[in-house]
Amino acid sequence: MARRTFDQQIQNLKDEILILGSMVEEATLSSVEALKRRDLDAARQIYEYDVNINDRRFAIENGILILIATQQPMARDLRLIAAMLEVITELERMGDYAKGIAKVTLRLGKTEFSIPHNEIRRMADLGIDMLHRALTAFIEQDARTASLIPEDDDKVDALYLHIYHHLVSEMIANPEVIDQANLLIWAIHNLERLADRVINICERTVFIKTGDILELDKEYRLFNVDDEEEEEEEEEEEEEDLDFMGEEAADQNGNA
């Protein structure tokens, strides 16, 4: 009964993390749209909305602490709980990035300056798609999928460099736009950092499955995760064999 209650509390926390993730996704895409339209009212709302993301994060953290205090988590449970604390911290920081983009829009105001909307939107879409898949993998504890997601970070980095070089060229050609260009560099930097924090979530998913904290960079090899999964399966099979042998011995003794 106690274990069932614990599992239900874990599931409730996972649901709350997904809600927090959806709040961050919406804030990020909305901030980029407000930047595109120079919608100062929308940017102001996004800026103020960040407090809701913070409150949700702290509520989840409080729930996790209560769970630790009232239950007796086992070793693997502790890995999941520790990872949850890390994930909500990452999500809260992503919310700050959306707030930062909204602040860029407010500071740009209605000044005349050409913004590479399509490339910035593409960065946001890639980052949010990575985040969505990373959270799904985290909830399902799918280490293999989580280890593949960081590959898309290269696309985000490539877009960042493309926009960055474009903005630097604009500043060289027209020094009068230096302030506006620097603000946009801040905005795309936030999107690039969001993708980096998605990788951190993926690393925590692998940690839950393997117990190892690995950096999912280009030199990471997928078979590391596969090997861990195979070892776990083999251990489970061995435990089942031992249980079966124990039952057989008990039957034979009973028949004797």
Image (cartoon, grey):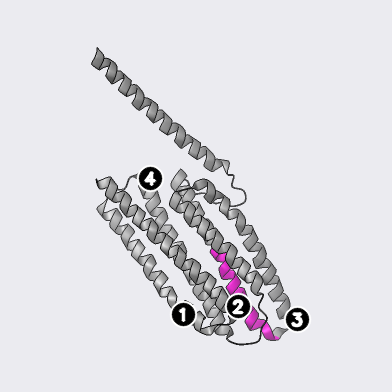
Say which residue label 1 marks.
45
**Mark 1 Cα-neighbour bin, 10 Å: few <14, some 14–19, many ≥20:** some
| For residue 229, side relative to residue 71 (left or right) | right
Pointer 3 and pointer 2: residues touching (CB < 8 Å)? no
Label 2 SS: helix
| For residue 139, side relative to residue 177 (left or right) | left
Residue 4 seen by the camera? yes
Say which residue label 4 marks.
76
Say which residue label 2 marks.
36
Residue positioned 44% across, 53% down in the render: 139
Q: Nearer the N terminus, badge 2 or badge 4?
A: 2
Label 1 SS: helix
Nearest to viewer (mark 2 / mark 4) = 2
Instruction: Point out which mark residue 134 bears.
Output: none
From what the image shows, is residue 228 above or below residue 247?
below
Query: Which amino acid lies under the numbered mark 4 shown in the image of this protein?
Result: Arg
Q: CA distance from mark 3 to mark 2?
A: 23 Å
Residue positioned 69% across, 86% down in the render: 176
Q: Which residues are magenta?
A: 176-194
Q: CA distance from mark 2 to mark 4?
A: 45 Å
Q: Main secondary structure of the magenta part?
A: helix
Q: Position of residue 26 (x, y in %)?
A: 49, 69
| For residue 145, side relative to residue 53 (left or right) | right
Query: Which amino acid lies under the numbered mark 1 shown in the image of this protein?
Result: Gln
Q: CA distance from mark 4 to mark 3?
A: 57 Å
Q: Nearer the viewer, residue 167 or 119?
A: 119
Is residue 137 part of the magenta span, yes or no?
Answer: no
Q: Nearer the N terminus, badge 1 or badge 2?
A: 2
Q: Nearer the N terminus, badge 3 or badge 2?
A: 2
Q: Quadrant of residue 115?
A: bottom right
Q: Nearer the viewer, residue 206 or 140?
A: 140
